[in-house]
Amino acid sequence: MALWRKRPKRKKRLWGFLLIVVVAALVVSFRLVEKIGPEKKPGDRFTVKRVIDGDTVELLGGDRLRLLSVDTPEKGEKLHDEAMYLLADVAQGKPARIEFGKNRRDRYGRLLGYLYVDDTLLVNKMIVDSGMAYVYLFEDADLGRPEVKSILNAQRGAMARHAGLWSIKRAPEPYYIATEHSFRLHRPSCKSVTDLKPGHFRRFATREEGLAEGLSPCRNCKP
């Protein structure tokens, strides 16, 4: 009989413990929701919050966007600051529309896409047209895509006007090389193109000839 009488006490203790756990869970969840705040509107997510460099922005929703098909100078290189200020002047604080490529994100978790502001202004093209960026394509690039075509034409126009990057004087090489299926242009002495077999590379008489086709300068030999 003594054992039977002790059971209600054990049940009371168990129910008391469960009640404490439930209350604690409710308090924690309430605080977490309070910190998160209200859900942002869909349009807010793609507002450009700030510019990180000439081809990367941070969106109000927290994502970073890397502009597709373009490459601006790195920090410490000529026109780096000018490219960044231009992008900020055109896009910062504005609601944006993003057209994504085949891959929605890169290995760093950044969004990849073509950035439109004011409904119709393709920012990627504008940066290239100003001479502040090179066309930058990869093997999986859709060359028939309207954005890619317009960006390529913008680069040719910037070249003809000697705008921005195209006004910088460079010592010419005897010729330039691009490997098979690659969109990078190399100096003949570049380690990336040593020991190439005939038929597996293209040769260009001038730097401009290769870049006009949509190639971009190798980041190692920097032609």
Image (spheres, rainbow, N blue to C red):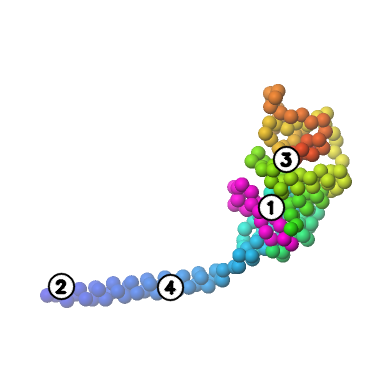
As drawn, the label of residue 114 is 1
Question: Sequence order check: which comes first, mark 1 or mark 3?
Answer: 1
Q: Is residue 180 above or below residue 36?
A: above
Label 2 environment density (alpha carbons within 10 Å; few <14, some 14–19, many ≥20) = few
Q: CA distance from mark 1 to mark 4?
A: 43 Å
Q: Is residue 121 above or below residue 168?
A: below
Which callout, 1 or 4, points at the residue further toward the start of the chain? Answer: 4
What is the quadrant of the C terminus in the image?
top right
The residue where tag 4 is placed is: 26
Residue to which mark 2 is pinned: 3
- Is there a contact, CB below 8 Å, between mark 4 and mark 2? no
Cα separation between marks 4 and 2: 36 Å
Residue bearing the label numbered 3: 219
Mark 1 nearby-residue class (10 Å; few <14, some 14–19, many ≥20): many
Viewer-side residue, 188 vs 163: 163
Q: Residue furthest top?
A: 198
Q: Residue furthest left?
A: 1
The kind of residue on which mark 4 rests is: Leu
The x, y position of residue 175, in whole percent, is 81, 29
> Magenta residues?
96-119
x, y percentage for residue 151? 75, 47
User: Identity of the amino acid at label 1?
Assistant: Tyr
Q: Residue at x 75, y 36 (%)?
A: 185
Q: Are marks 2 and 3 in contact (CB under 8 Å)?
A: no
CA separation in Å, label 4 and label 3: 54 Å
Amino acid beneath label 3: Arg
Callout 2 amino acid: Leu
Q: Quadrant of residue 172?
A: top right
Label 1 to label 2: alpha-carbon separation: 75 Å
